[in-house]
């Protein structure tokens, strides 16, 4: 009970500090909602003075102050860059950065309307309702794929040569983490060998590049009727392989399908429609390479004990999916 009170008191303190911040006090903020991210607190306010809604994203105290400030400055600058490069009709689909509050470790943004895709899928892609939502899943997949395609087309850069060493080095820490979540060393070695072999075959091959959102997962996609908005540009990169965004979305949906709660058929229809709208097929060898890497990342982040009683089963299913993708990579060859 004491721990709950401490957490509540911490929230109350953060809310009060932000509401009374000298840069925001004249806005006359009314708290509407609060939630927690992986390392941040998200507070939604209504400004009575400006007749608008704003989001205040505050980096947790567990993050070093210099890293927290660097993170909010990066996201602020990223959103400025993104909005400079997007066409006018696309601007209302990404947040507008309003100000940085370094002393409060916070970033202020305009609030975008919509329901997170993660909430929609929990409601409409579960195994009871999902089989009857075929057209809905198709429409959602098309909406998401079209947004990402337009985002990448608007920020397209020259292709980048595939650098196998850099690609594989980024995965090494993840392989270590995979061991801590319960993967056997021989399984990790097999996955590492197959990904390394495939990556080396693509050495120097030009890879489509553009700006990448960096965390293109259902929690960051807001659906409002036939409109999609995307939030959280903390991991934004001005020039990166476009497969990064595509693969993390696919991997995340595959990870969701390992929960017995969801309809695999509904999620598969969502995935197929997404890829079709974006203009790719899952059989593409380069996409498979990035998909395998994204699955490694998600496996390394699994918390088996918190997922009880399905944790071990989820780990087994995700490992099977990862092995299948890696085995398919073994037969792929550079074009």
Image (spheres, grey):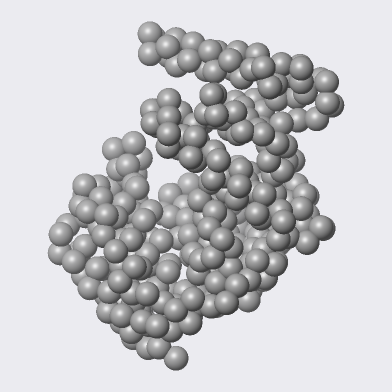
* x 76%, y 20%: residue: 27
Mark yes or no: residue 42 visible.
Answer: no
Q: Specify whether 302 is left or right of 107.
A: left
In the picture shown, does residue 66 fall above or below 143?
Answer: above
Q: Where is residue 291 in the image (x, y as percent from the top left)?
A: 43, 67
Of residues 59 and 252, the one nearer the viewer is 59
Residue 56 found in image quarter: top right
Of residues 224 and 57, the one nearer the viewer is 57
Q: Specify whether 322 is left or right of 4.
A: left
* x 42%, y 37%: residue: 67
* x 80%, y 30%: residue: 52
Q: List the single residue furthest toward the bottom.
A: 335
Q: In which quarter of the image is the C terminus?
A: bottom left
Marker count (numbered) = 0
In the picture shown, does residue 214 fall above or below 64?
Answer: below
Q: Where is residue 306 in the image (x, y as percent from the top left)?
A: 34, 36
Q: Position of residue 325 (x, y in %)?
A: 37, 72
* x 53%, y 78%: residue: 159
In the picture shown, does residue 56 fall above or below 186?
Answer: above
Of residues 132 and 178, the one nearer the viewer is 178
Residue 62 found in image quarter: top left
Q: Quadrant of the N terminus?
A: top left
Mark yes or no: residue 76 visible.
Answer: yes
Of residues 335 and 319, the one nearer the viewer is 335
Q: Where is residue 65 in the image (x, y as percent from the top left)?
A: 43, 29
């Amino acid at each position: 009970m004491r721990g709950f009170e401490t957490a509540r008191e911490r929230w109350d303190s953060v809310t009060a500090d932000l509401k009374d911040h000298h840069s925001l006090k004249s806005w006359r903020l009314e708290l509407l909602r609060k939630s927690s991210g992986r390392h941040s607190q998200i507070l939604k306010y209504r400004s009575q003075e400006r007749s608008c809604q704003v989001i205040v994203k505050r980096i947790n105290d567990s993050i070093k102050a210099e890293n927290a400030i660097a993170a909010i400055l990066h996201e602020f600058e990223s959103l400025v860059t993104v909005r400079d490069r997007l066409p006018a009709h696309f601007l209302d689909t990404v947040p507008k950065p309003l100000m940085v509050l370094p002393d409060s470790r916070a970033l202020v943004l305009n609030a975008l309307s919509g329901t997170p895709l993660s909430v929609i899928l929990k409601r409409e892609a579960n195994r009871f309702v999902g089989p009857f939502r075929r057209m809905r899943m198709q429409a959602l997949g098309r909406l998401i794929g079209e947004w990402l395609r337009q985002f990448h087309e608007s920020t397209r850069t020259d292709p980048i040569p595939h650098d196998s060493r850099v690609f594989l080095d980024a995965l090494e820490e993840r392989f270590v983490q995979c061991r801590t979540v319960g993967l056997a060393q021989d399984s990790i070695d097999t996955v590492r060998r197959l990904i390394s072999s495939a990556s080396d075959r693509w050495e120097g091959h030009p890879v489509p590049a553009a700006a990448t959102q960096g965390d293109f997962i259902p929690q960051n996609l807001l659906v409002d009727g036939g409109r999609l908005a995307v939030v959280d540009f903390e991991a934004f990169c001005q020039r990166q392989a476009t497969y990064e965004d595509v693969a993390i979305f696919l991997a995340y949906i595959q990870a969701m399908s390992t929960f017995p709660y969801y309809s695999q058929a509904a999620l598969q229809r969502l995935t197929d429609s997404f890829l079709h709208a974006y203009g790719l097929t899952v059989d593409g060898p380069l996409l498979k390479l990035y998909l395998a890497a994204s699955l490694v990342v998600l496996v390394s982040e699994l918390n088996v004990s918190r997922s009880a009683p399905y944790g071990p089963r989820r780990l087994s299913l995700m490992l099977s999916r990862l092995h299948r993708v890696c085995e398919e990579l073994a037969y792929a060859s550079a074009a």
